[in-house]
Amino acid sequence: MKSALTIGLTFTAGIVLSGCVLTQKMMPGTMSNSEIFGVLDTINHSEIDAGNLAREKTTAPEVRLFASRMVSEHQRMMEDMNELVQRMDVQPQKPALAFTLNDTHQGMMEELRDKSGSDFDKAYIEYQVKMHEQAVDLVKNAADEVDNFSLKKHLREARPELYSHLDSAQSIQGE
């Protein structure tokens, strides 16, 4: 039953997030620089939060290593982003997409807290695959849309790292 709940929540989150990305992309004028930073901030905080939980609860060494990597690399990504925010003199603002991402993350964290052992590991990695697929799409779309050179460069530099995170999560999922 819990597995069906996990699959259902993951599927629902994917639909909601896909719809939000599509809606956000189709909105007149697309997201502002401040809103892009708000979404990136939400993603980084979510990854750090989930990674910290996984480091505490996982039973698999490869999941613990992956979770530690997520915490470390998303903290660094957040620091890099904050430096750019200061250089550009913008204030991150959270659009509807950021609130939807956060709500989905909080729901998944509640579900993860109730799991243990291999059930936890599987649910965490499924979550990581889905979230990194969506993060890659969002960063790619945003990089194609923004006019600011520094922000465009930041997004393009983040994409390979997000692909690496996705590849690692998919590799663990396949084991």
Image (spheres, grey):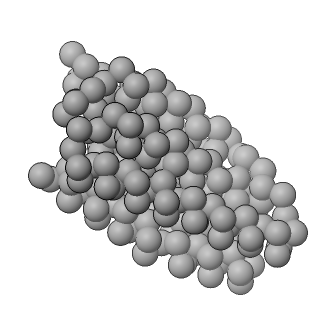
Q: Is residue 145 visible?
A: no
The structure residue drawn at horizontal position 74% and vertical position 72%, both measured from the top left corner, is: 84
Closest to the observer, 2 or 54: 54
Q: Is residue 59 left or right of residue 97?
A: left
**x, y percentage for residue 148?**
74, 78
Percent coordinates x, y for residue 155 in the rendering: 58, 73
Name the outermost residue toward the right.
89
Q: Would residue 159 appear left or right of 4 to someone viewing this image?
A: right
Q: Pick whichever, 66 or 138, lies toward us.
A: 66
Identify the residue at image location x=78%, y=55%: 92
- Regarding residue 80, the answer to whether it shows in the image is yes
Which residue appears farthest toward the top when viewing the image?
Answer: 1
The structure residue drawn at horizontal position 27% and vertical position 49%, both measured from the top left corner, is: 63
Above/below status of 154 relative to 13: below
Could you tell me which quadrant the N terminus lies in?
top left
Q: Residue at x 23, y 49 (%)?
A: 61
